[in-house]
Image (tube, helix red, strand yellow):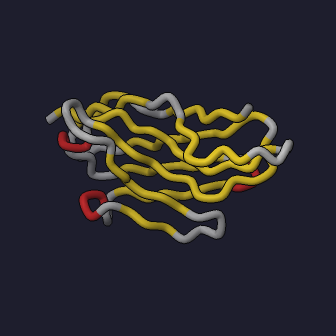
């Protein structure tokens, strides 16, 4: 089994910053794409940003210039640096990854449990 565990969420004032982390654990051989999604109350889950194993990134227009995704392949961890936060960034943030386990099972689109980010105005 493999799992993803997010951390770093919390309450912050508008204009502030937070850094989310997501660590993959278990019998991991390799991790392909990793990403962050978010879901606000009453809304569908949406992509925030993703990153390939080689470091190519993609992000939603709503967060461009404010959020930065990065990863540490040696630590099986992906990060989301969030700056200039706005109240509309309030959501549960989920980590997602495509993982090859050591027993050659492929865990496509594995999700973490989510971490709450609340931005007050």
Coordinates of residue 79 in the picture (x, y in percent): 53, 49
Q: Along the horizontal axis of the image, is 14 left or right of 28?
A: left
Q: Is residue 47 above or below residue 3?
A: below
Residue sitting at x 48%, y 34%: 8
Q: Quadrant of the N terminus?
A: top right
Q: Residue furthest front?
A: 105
Instruction: Locate residue 72: give its quadrant.
Output: bottom right
Coordinates of residue 102 in the picture (x, y in percent): 84, 44
Q: Is residue 25 above or below residue 32?
A: above
Q: Along the horizontal axis of the image, is 49 left or right of 97?
A: left
Instruction: Locate residue 101: give its quadrant.
Output: top right
Q: Is residue 84 above or below residue 57?
A: above
Q: Along the horizontal axis of the image, is 46 left or right of 73?
A: left
Of residues 104 and 85, the one drawn nearer to the viewer in this rendering: 104
Coordinates of residue 14 in the picture (x, y in percent): 21, 41
Q: Quadrant of the C terminus?
A: top left
Residue sitting at x 53%, y 62%: 51
Residue sitting at x 53%, y 34%: 112
Q: Residue furthest right?
A: 103
Of residues 85 and 58, the one drawn nearer to the viewer in this rendering: 58
Coordinates of residue 77 in the picture (x, y in percent): 64, 46
Q: Is residue 71 above or below residue 95?
A: below
């Amino acid at each position: 089994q493999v799992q993803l565990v997010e951390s770093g969420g919390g309450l912050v004032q508008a204009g502030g910053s937070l850094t989310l982390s997501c660590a993959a654990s278990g019998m991991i051989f390799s991790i392909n794409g990793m990403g962050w999604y978010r879901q606000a109350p009453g809304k569908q889950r949406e992509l925030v940003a993703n990153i390939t194993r080689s470091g190519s990134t993609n992000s939603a227009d709503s967060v461009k210039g404010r959020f930065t995704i990065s990863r540490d392949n040696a630590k099986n961890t992906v990060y989301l640096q969030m700056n200039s936060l706005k109240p509309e960034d309030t959501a549960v943030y989920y980590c997602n990854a495509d993982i090859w386990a050591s027993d050659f099972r492929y865990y496509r689109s594995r999700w973490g449990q989510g971490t709450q980010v609340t931005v007050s105005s």
